[in-house]
Amino acid sequence: MDDSSIHENTALRSFIENEILLHKLYAHYSTLFPEDKEFWRDISADEAEHAGWVSSLSNRIDNGEVRLAAGRFEPETLTSFADYIQEQIDRIDTENILQIQALSISMDLENSMLEKSMFKSYETDSPELREVMDRLQKSTEFHYQEVKDRWTAEREKTAQNP
C-alpha cells in the first residue's frame, strides 16, 4: 500500500465515521421524538447504509481496484464535522432539545455536506466510486428536502401555537 492509499483509506474511515455518527444522532432523535419515530429511524437507517456503501470501497482502494481522486476529503473538514455531530449527540443527554432544533441541526448537517461538495465526482475517480458518490449525493439531497419540509411544517405549527 502506497502513501496515497493510506491517505485515501484514512479519509474514507473518517467519512465512514461521520456517516455512523449521523446514524447515531438520528437514532437518538427517533427515541426523543416518538411522534416522528419512523421519520428519524428511516433517515438513521439510510446513514448506516451510506457508511456501508463507502466501507465496501475501502478494501478495493487498498487493492488498487478503485481510485479515489486526490484531495477528495480534507481531514480537517471531516474531523470538525465529526466533532460537531458528536456535540449534538452529547447535547441530547444534557439539554431539552425541541423538535424544531433537531430539524434545524439536521437540515444544517445535510446542507453542509451538499455545500462542501462531499459527494462531487472527479474524472480520476473509478466508475464504482462515482456511482457511490452519486447515490450519496441523491440520498443527501432527498434527506435535506425531507428535513426542510418537516422543519417548515414544524415552524408553521409553532407560529400558530406560540
Image (cartoon, grey):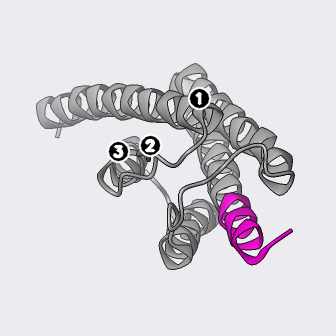
Span colored in magenta: 1-14
Instruction: Kindly identify which residue carries mark 1.
Output: 34
What x and y, as percent, mark residue 100?
33, 44
Q: Residue at x 21, y 31 (%)?
A: 152
Reading the image, the residue beneath label 3 is 107
Residue neighbourhood size for the residue with mark 2, other residues' Cα within 10 Å, grouped as few (<14), some (14–19), many (≥20): many
Left or right of 98: which side holds 82?
A: right
The residue mark sitting in front, 1 or 3, is 3
- Horizontal placement of 37 versus 119: left or right? right
Query: What amino acid is found at the position of numbered circle 1 in the picture?
Result: Pro
User: Could you tell whether 150 is left or right of 83 in the image?
Assistant: left
Quadrant that contains the N terminus: bottom right
Dot 1, crowdedness within 10 Å: few (<14), some or many (≥20)?
few
Residue at (60%, 49%) from the top-left corner?
Answer: 22
Label 2 or label 3, whichever lies nearer to me, is: 2
**On the image, which quarter does residue 48 sit in?**
top right
- Residue at the location (29% across, 53% down)? 115
Q: Which residue is mark 2?
A: 121
Q: Quadrant of the C terminus?
A: top left
Amino acid beneath label 3: Met
Magenta stretch, main secondary structure, is helix
Is residue 3 magenta-colored?
A: yes
Viewer-nearest of labels 1 and 2? 2
Q: Which of the 4 image quadrants contains residue 92? A: bottom right
Circle 2: residue type: Ser
* Residue 161 circle label: none
Return the residue found at the far left: 160
- Residue under the image location 35 percent in, 46 percent down: 114
Q: Mark 2 or mark 3: name the one nearer the start of the chain.
A: 3
Look at the numbered disc 3 and give the secondary structure of its residue. helix
